[in-house]
Image (cartoon, rainbow, N blue to C red):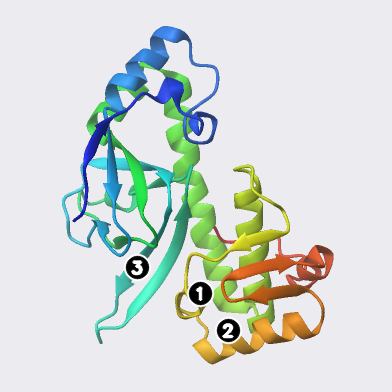
Amino acid sequence: MNSTSIKVACSNCNLRELCMPLGLNESEMERVDEVVATRRKVGRGDNLFRNGDKFNALYAIRTGFFKTRISSEDGRDQVTGFQMAGEIIGLDGIVSDHHTCDAVALEDAEVCVMPFDRIEELSREITSLQRHVHKIMSREIVRENGVMLLLGSMRAEERLAAFLVNLVQRLHARGFSQSELVLRMTREEIGSFLGLKLETVSRTFSKFVEDGIVEVKQRHVRILNPDALKLIVNAQTCQPS
């Protein structure tokens, strides 16, 4: 693994509001700073952790994009999610003390390492931190339910539209444009996540272009008609993240 560790302070981080609870006083913030002691750099294509690795920390993504994947018995990879800056990764390991998927960097990335035993210890004393951890875990459950809905009841167009709408919403929360995005993942990886073949993903993108809903130049996507995209999602209230 290409990784180096750097000393970090949450109190100075511009993503603090996305991955840390609001309203911590100065002494509480100092204690959180002590827990989140290091950052780790992960090179593109490298694993942050692998299926079967011992679980000992959660990771807040500071820069970059990740995918999580599991390997089926016949050796195929199934993408289970995409994670971006300001999101927490590694929750899969809490249940059995071992990670149950691989986390792979889709581009050069940097994460903040949060030792879970220290987080648990501090959560017992700082109730807002405990609530925040529960909120993150709840968000993961909602995300999984959203994926199940996608794979179980939506047509290809609805799946891809829901994926794009959700991605734009998450990027917008981090200060990015509501209408333009660069896809860090390949169409094949999108297909794996959405349960679609590569040619179906490409064909659906082409249809969106023909209908004047999006403009696509390689991995650059510009959303020209966000209302039409949301309409395709069919007023589904539960979307994946």
Q: Disc 1, disc 2: CB below 8 Å?
A: yes
Q: Of discs 1 and 3, which sits in the foreground?
A: 1
Mark 3 vs 2, N-terminal side: 3
Badge 3 density bin: few <14, some 14–19, many ≥20, Cα 10 Å: many
Badge 2 is on which residue? 201
Name the element at disc 1: helix
The answer to which image quadrant residue 167 occupies is: bottom right
Mark 1 vs 2, N-terminal side: 1
Give the image location of residue 172, x and y in percent. 66, 48
The answer to which image quadrant residue 223 occupies is: bottom right
Badge 1 is on which residue? 190
Amino acid of disc 1: Ile
Give the image location of residue 118, x and y in percent. 25, 27
Q: CA distance from mark 1 to mark 2?
A: 8 Å
Residue 36 or residue 233, whichever sits in front? 36
Amino acid of disc 3: Arg
Q: CA distance from mark 3 to mark 2?
A: 19 Å
The answer to which image quadrant residue 189 occupies is: bottom left
Q: What residue is at 50 percent from the left and 26 percent from the top?
A: 21
Query: Which quarter shows the C terminus?
Result: bottom right
Badge 3 is on which residue? 69
Q: What residue is at 82 percent from the left and 70 percent from the top?
A: 228
Name the element at disc 2: helix
